[in-house]
Amino acid sequence: MARIRRLVIPGGVIVLTGPKYSVFTIDEFIEPRERLLSKGRLVEFSEWETSERTEIANDIASRFGEYRKAGALDGRPFEGGGTKTFQFVRTPEGWRIAAFSWYDQS
């Protein structure tokens, strides 16, 4: 989770468009996921891209992709997928995430 915090610029925005529209700060995004992982509710989780397209123009970049995921939540196996998009900016420290949005189809 610390790595995610380092990769997002201050004021970065995270948006879930579906199935329920929600807007998060980085801390609001990370906190519930930390609880799921630390309490053992979410186990054997993995997520992988099934397609992607990245465009870079000078110090900005955009990545759009489809993903799949699988794991067990509260002892029940699940699978799902969706669509994600990232907006990146090149900072003095390297590439960082300015915004991240996704639609979760599961």
Image (cartoon, grey):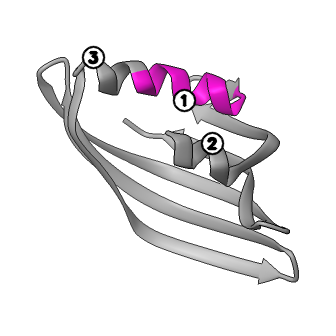
Q: Nearer the viewer, residue 102 or 88?
A: 88
| Residue type for callout 3 | Lys
Can residue 24 be seen here? The reply is yes
* Residue 58 sits in quarter: bottom right
Q: Is residue 18 above or below residue 4?
A: above
User: Label 1, label 2: how many angstroms apart (C-alpha)?
Assistant: 8 Å
Badge 3: how crowded within 10 Å, few (<14), some, or many (20+)?
few
Which residues are the magenta region?
24-34
Q: Position of residue 88 (x, y in %)?
A: 75, 63
Instruction: Residue 69 in the image: state x and y as whole percent.
Output: 31, 48
Q: Residue at x 59, y 76 (%)?
A: 53
Q: CA distance from mark 3 to mark 2?
A: 21 Å
Which image quarter: residue 78?
top left
Picture quarter with the C terminus: top left
Q: Which mark is residue 5?
A: 2
Relative to 14, is 34 above or below? Answer: above
Residue wearing tag 3: 39
| Of 40 and 92, the residue lying toward us | 92
Residue 4 vs residue 49: left or right? right
Q: Which mark is residue 81?
A: none
Check disc 1: other Cα within 10 Å, few if <14, some if 14-19, many if 20+: some
Q: Earlier in the sequence, mark 1 or mark 3?
A: 1
Residue named by callout 1:
30
Q: Would residue 54 be counted in the magenta stretch?
A: no
Q: Secondary structure at mark 2?
A: helix
Q: Are marks 1 and 2 in contact (CB under 8 Å)?
A: yes
